[in-house]
Amino acid sequence: MEGADDPATDFPLANLPMGVIAGEGRGLRIGVRIGAFIVDCRTLVESGLLAARLDQKITDALSDRSLNAYMALGQSAWRLTRAELTRLLSSETSDLRDHPSRKSIMLPEWGMTAKVPCEIGDYTDFYASVHHATNVGSMFRPDNPLLPNWKHLPIGYHGRSSSMVPSGTQIVRPNGQTVTQDDGPPTFGPTRLLDYEMEVGALIGTGNPIGEPISVNQAMDRVFGLVLLNDWSARDIQKWEYQPLGPFVAKNFASTLSGWVVSLDALEPYRIPLPARPSSDPQPLPYLRWSEDYVLDINLEVLISSAAMRTAGSAPTRISLGNYRDMYWSIAQMIAHHTSGGCNLRTGDLLASGTVSGPTEESRGCLLERTWRGTKPIQLGDGTERKFLQDGDEVIMRAWCQRSGLPRIGFGECRGVIMPAKKL
Ligand code: MN
């Protein structure tokens, strides 16, 4: 398949991420990305090529305008479909390669737009990186960076799904209350401390009935796949509002999602056993312990280009390079804890990791940490400095897995340009 063998592509045959696409007058379709092409699943189903090996409930779901019905079918259906798509898209098989409808099944990606990949249900954002939590905690509470609960449970808050937007959507700088002194009074106006947060999101495929928690050892079977997420954050608004109930208007104005959902089966070669905790740390309680628990070796990159840099045609500047393997809490632990009191997860729910930061300065996943609250500005390729984001800045997030002997697989991009605040 064209482009699928390119060693630099995010989308070789080993990946096959799914999303929802529109373009070329087709309306919304489920798509599977391979190389520089997207498989239009509805047209593929109509061609009859899937009928021999996949039953009708799967092909019906693949013909839908949204991924949710397919996600709800569960892991065995996802695996059957993946195996069949792998067979059809392999260059050795002729069924699709020589099919008369091939050109209307395999669409060049440049003509299509990837949307938010499913109808997002409830959204929960965690705080699962010990490096991020310690860095942020030490800025606000130098003597007591990690609160006593942090190493006992994956901290999270319930966010909004209504403001989830696809990669490429412009982000309007939010207005809100900010203070110059800790105890106020506030003024209302555009945030001056606009930030990004580099995160990995897990999309729930199959949920649980209310009152029936998901055990930690079964949690990963419920995950349809992973996406990149930029949890845009207004730090000055956040600082004034976050106590006592957590972030609110500082984060609910927009979060950007990448368009392609990478399956756990594609990521399987990149599992790393969840590291044993140092003896100085508390061990997790039994309901959060799974002997096969793992993190994933995913490189996470953040770049910024100013409006001037894009006008000049110069490349964006890399701001950070981190790795998802540095997380303290696993996705399985997040799911087990989330449902431990009986909360039901549903198809399309999104559980995000929180900012992914590692032990080095370069691996810090937001500007608050990267510039240490603005005290150590970073330099862009056009010679200007950034403490926080300016209007016209574009934030680009990328993620990929790479190991010798294996094809590189990637997540594509999660992008957004900052637009000026609305006039008051
Ligand atoms: Mn966040």
Image (tube, helix red, strand yellow):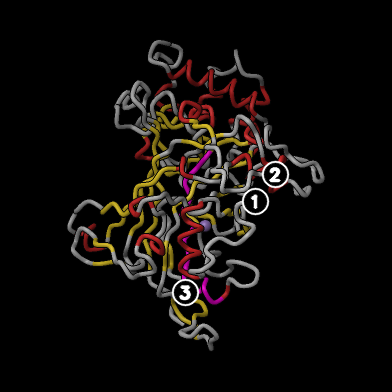
- Which amino acid type is marked by label 3? Asp
- Vertical position of residue 146 compared to residue 299: above or below: below
Is residue 111 left or right of 291 when viewed as pictured?
A: left
Q: Which mark is residue 236?
A: 3
Mark 2: C-beta under 8 Å from nearest atom of ligand 1:
no
User: Which is nearer the eye, 182 or 411?
Assistant: 182
User: Which is nearer the eye, 9 or 192?
Assistant: 192
Report the mark closest to the observer, 3 or 1. 1
Magenta stretch, residue numbers:
226-240
Is disc 2 placed on a helix, strand or loop?
loop
Q: Residues within 10 Å of mark 3 (few under 14, many from 20)?
A: some
- Which amino acid type is marked by label 1? His
Report the mark closest to the observer, 2 or 3. 2
Q: Of label 2 and label 3, which has the lower sequence position?
A: 3
Is disc 3 placed on a helix, strand or loop?
helix
Point 43% across, 63% down: residue: 171
Q: Of label 1 and label 2, which has the lower sequence position?
A: 1
Point 47% across, 17% down: residue: 88
- C-alpha gap between disc 2 and disc 3: 36 Å
Q: Which mark is residue 285?
A: 2
Q: Residues within 10 Å of mark 1 (few under 14, many from 20)?
A: some
Point 50% across, 38% down: residue: 261
Proximity of marks 1 and 2: CB atoms separated by less than 8 Å: yes
Q: Position of residue 21 (x, y in %)?
A: 48, 40
Which image quadrant is residue 278 in?
top right
- Vertical position of residue 2 compared to residue 97: above or below: below
Which residue matches tag 1?
Answer: 152
